């Protein structure tokens, strides 16, 4: 695996440069407000992006979008629509992921809506063991800990990728502080998580995130003996069990950036059993 990592990094950097030079193409989605003025949509890769993680290789050809259902769920706060199912294109089979909640991210002190987010998970994963006595909070945490997940973000207006990054870093830093206070992580582990967090921050270029164009973050299911990873579409990869899991959990637990998304997820998952 070690010889794949330098190759993955070189290919990821190459595809990112290609994406910046690529001709305009409207990303094919079921969104209610697709914009024809958008010039550089975010793809899983350029001509070919290869991101090596654990035993899997995720890639996407620029001419192929991942399959998405025509049925959608609309965020009532923004009128942005999310497909009910999506599939991440990969060299190994990744099952269709199901939408379990949508919600808006609002900057309270400014009073405007930044983006809508949708959370997708693999509800058919055989490692799921959801019982009726579990609370919705326990159910979604169990699901996040055991399955493939995608967080899809769709900006309501064009914004900067660095603004998005800053929100991610703030949320993860806050969870690190709580993890230290609760004893979940030791001081040494806190220091160790600093490296992947810095890598995450360094992935985001000072470029726009165009409105109504999906930006996906993929978190593969855990694999024995391998660190869990975060894959930021068209940007790169970060390896860290704690960071990957807590990135998703930060959206479905208290002090989340989008309470409507959290409430939607908990409501939709309340009756789920497996």
Image (cartoon, rainbow, N blue to C red):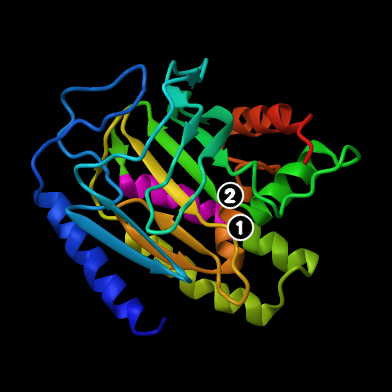
Q: Main secondary structure of the magenta part?
A: helix
Q: Count of labels shown?
A: 2
Q: Position of residue 58 (x, y in %)?
A: 37, 58
Q: Residue furthest right?
A: 133
Q: Position of residue 184 (x, y in %)?
A: 75, 68
| Label pair 2/1, CB-CB below 8 angstroms | yes
> For residue 221, what is the image quadrant?
bottom right
In the displayed structure image, the side of residue 250 where residue 216 appears, left or right: left
Task: Tell me what residue is drawn at x 48 percent, y 51 percent.
Answer: 94
Examine the rendered structure and indicate whether residue 24 appears above or below residue 206: above
Q: Position of residue 28 (x, y in %)?
A: 27, 29
Q: Quadrant of the C terminus?
A: top right
In the displayed structure image, the side of residue 177 where residue 92 appears, left or right: left
Examine the rendered structure and indicate whether residue 215 appears above or below residue 234: above
Q: Quadrant of the N terminus?
A: bottom left
Question: Which residue lies under the disc numbered 1?
Answer: 245
Q: Which residues are magenta?
A: 161-173
């Amino acid at each position: 695996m070690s010889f794949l990592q330098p190759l993955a990094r070189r290919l990821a950097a190459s595809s990112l440069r290609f994406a910046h030079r690529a001709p305009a193409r409207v990303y094919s989605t079921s969104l209610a407000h697709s914009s024809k003025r958008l010039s550089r949509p975010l793809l899983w890769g350029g001509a070919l992006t290869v991101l090596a993680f654990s035993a899997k290789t995720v890639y996407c050809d620029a001419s192929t979008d991942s399959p998405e259902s025509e049925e959608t769920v609309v965020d009532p706060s923004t009128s942005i629509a999310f497909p009910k199912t999506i599939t991440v294109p990969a060299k190994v089979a990744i099952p269709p992921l199901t939408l379990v909640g949508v919600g808006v991210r609002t900057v309270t002190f400014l009073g405007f809506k930044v983006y809508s987010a949708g959370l997708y998970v693999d509800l058919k994963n055989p490692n799921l063991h959801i019982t009726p006595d579990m609370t919705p909070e326990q159910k979604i945490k169990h699901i996040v800990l055991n399955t493939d997940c995608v967080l899809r973000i769709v900006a309501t207006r064009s914004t900067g990728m660095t603004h998005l990054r800053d929100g991610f870093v703030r949320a993860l830093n806050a969870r690190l502080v709580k993890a230290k206070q609760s004893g979940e992580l030791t001081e040494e582990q806190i220091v160790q998580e600093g490296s992947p967090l810095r890598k995450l921050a360094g992935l985001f270029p000072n470029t726009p995130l165009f409105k109504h164009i999906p930006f996906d973050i993929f978190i593969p299911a855990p694999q024995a003996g391998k660190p869990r990873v975060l894959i930021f579409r068209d940007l790169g990869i970060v390896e860290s069990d704690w960071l990957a899991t807590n990135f998703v959990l930060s959206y479905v637990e208290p002090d989340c950036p989008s309470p409507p998304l959290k409430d939607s997820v908990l409501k939709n998952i309340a009756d789920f059993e497996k």
